[in-house]
Amino acid sequence: MYLHSSGSTGLPKAIPIPHATLLDRAHFGCTNGMFTGVVAAFTLPPFGVAGVACQILAPLFAGHPSAVFPPALNPSSPITLTADNVMVYMRRNKLTSMIVFPAFLHKWAKDEAAVKYLCSLDNIGYAGGPLLPSIGQTLVEQGVNIKAIYASTEIGGASLYDGIAAKEDWEYFEWNPLLKLRLFAKGDGSYEAHVLSTDQQHLPIIDTPDKLGFDLPDLFEKHPTKEGLWRILGRKDDVFIDATGVNVVPGPMEAVVNSNPHVATAVMFGQHRMQSGILIQLNESGLADDVDETILRDHIWQSIEEGNRIVQNYARINKSMILFTTLSKPLPLKVKGLVRRKDALKLYEHEIDTLYSNAEKAGGRYEIAAL
């Protein structure tokens, strides 16, 4: 079977998964407590590993029926995957578990009726990106059972759903015990990881220097007090190095800014620069190109301040380092709805250079964003 990679670091790729590997993955992934009752299989694209798990593997290996969107009466107008449509069909089919993108939880968290419904579900796994800590904590405190899921097309399900993590540890996961792992401390509290190929885990892609396994594209962090729990810090390819040689992980700040109702998507920048900045695309409820940028900054500044509270000092963003996209140059997105970082920064390379040039002309000094 050929599955579709996310295209997070380049063009999407077709990943060959041998049947033996698919069976190994299915045995673990579908019997670890994630799937119960009727599974929502329309919450994810069907051509990726999670979509295949929900639509094909869960019924075969866990015995749970899966619900998909009904066939479109007009093939040119299929039902689209949106937070609103997912909620409609979840209720209509009386479903009990789902895997969903964090962006949907961000939207549902603002709807009292949606939160009440989410509390009635057995399991909600989120994957594919970061969930804003304040939203995740609020949902858990209201009784929603959410957990982080870590998986990829190359290695399958890498996290144990029904493990030792308590409800309050919703953003942490326990590694799949069937995986053979190598973890490397980076010296700053983060870790890189290799998954090694074994008789039980035949990897379709081998790219470690010693040709023994797959180099995971993410950085990880241990739970501060509980052994065996980990969380994702962000993708290694997303990390950039500022002018002082410090690694900046953009994921936490971007997650906060993306939760702002005026923001469609955001991407941090600052490679080899003295200060980080952020490129923001407003959503349809945002403001037009001819609106003064001072007004635009005011609309999202509260979110920037919230992000500045949870990141290191060197990753904070000053109000002068906010750049907005134009209607004529929308940011390129991948299937998960997240921005294609490298392409986006290339698209706005001139505007970013101009922003830094203007800062240098103003005196060459960069203010540290105050809390």
Image (cartoon, rainbow, N blue to C red):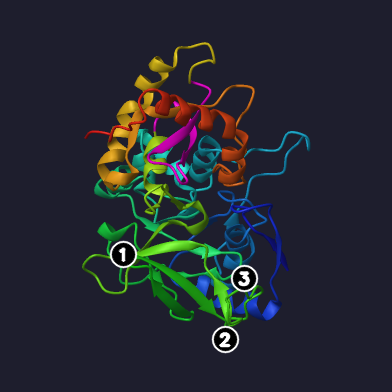
Say whether residue 4 is left or right of residue 132.
Answer: right
Whole-number angstrom distance, CA of label 2 to CA of label 1: 28 Å
Asked if the residue at tag 1 contacts the one at tag 2, i.e. Cβ–Cβ closer than 8 Å, the answer is: no
Q: Secondary structure at mark 3?
A: helix
Which residue is rendered at x = 34% and y = 41% of the image?
116
Frontmost residue, 240 versus 66: 240
Whole-number angstrom distance, CA of label 1 to CA of label 3: 40 Å
Callout 3 amino acid: Leu
| Mark nearer the viewer, 1 or 3 | 1
Q: Earlier in the sequence, mark 1 or mark 3?
A: 3
User: Residue 188: horizontal and vertical position, in percent?
Assistant: 32, 63
Q: Which residue is mark 2?
A: 198
Q: Earlier in the sequence, mark 2 or mark 1?
A: 1
Image quarter where the N terminus lies is bottom right
Which residue is rendered at x = 38% and y = 46% of the image?
118
Q: Which residue is mark 3?
A: 60
Callout 2 amino acid: Thr
Which residue is rendered at x = 61% and y = 64% of the image?
153
Q: Which residues are magenta?
A: 260-285
